[in-house]
Image (cartoon, grey):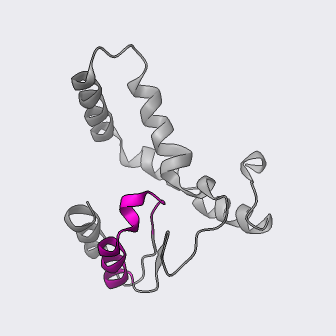
Amino acid sequence: MLETFFIPEIKKLHKLRSAIFQQDGAPPHFSIDVRRYLDDHFPGRWIGRGGSIRWASRSPDLTPLDFFLWGHIKNNIYKTPIKDIAELKRRIETEIKSISKEILYNGFSNISKRMNLCISVDGSHFEHLL
């Protein structure tokens, strides 16, 4: 996904040299190959396990996928009972494809507010302050 979608899109926006990349702590994202790739494309500018910028402690509230996108998708996928894995896969694909730019913008637009709150509470929990 990074090579085939994200990097080309960032290049189109002429932001590759200034973008800061953030990833979660999933074990596959910690492989040496992934870390080398991120070091090559985001030198000194990536947040994640083993990255040049450390994660804020207890910071899932800073990850748009965690605080917004997965919940949004899950709510829509499970509105009605699912019969089997094939249907689940279809619903996930359909839901992801149906996400509009406006929905993404709304979900990601308050990241600055969340970052400032995290800083103001020295990295402690802050969701109750939103």
Quarter location, residue 111: bottom right
Does 61 sit above or below residue 43? Answer: above
Front-lying residue, 103 or 56: 56
Q: Can I make out residue 4 in this image?
A: yes
Which span is picked out in magenta? 22-42
Where is the N terminus found, in terms of image quarters? Answer: bottom left
Residue 91 x, y percent position in the rendering: 29, 28
- Is 35 contained in the magenta span? yes
Q: Residue at x 48, y 75 (%)?
A: 50
- Is 130 contained in the magenta span? no
Q: Residue at x 29, y 26 (%)?
A: 88
78 with respect to 33 (left or right): right
Residue 38 x, y percent position in the rendering: 35, 76
91 with respect to 110 (left or right): left
Does 46 sit above or below residue 101? Answer: below
Quarter location, residue 76: top left
Q: Main secondary structure of the magenta part?
A: helix
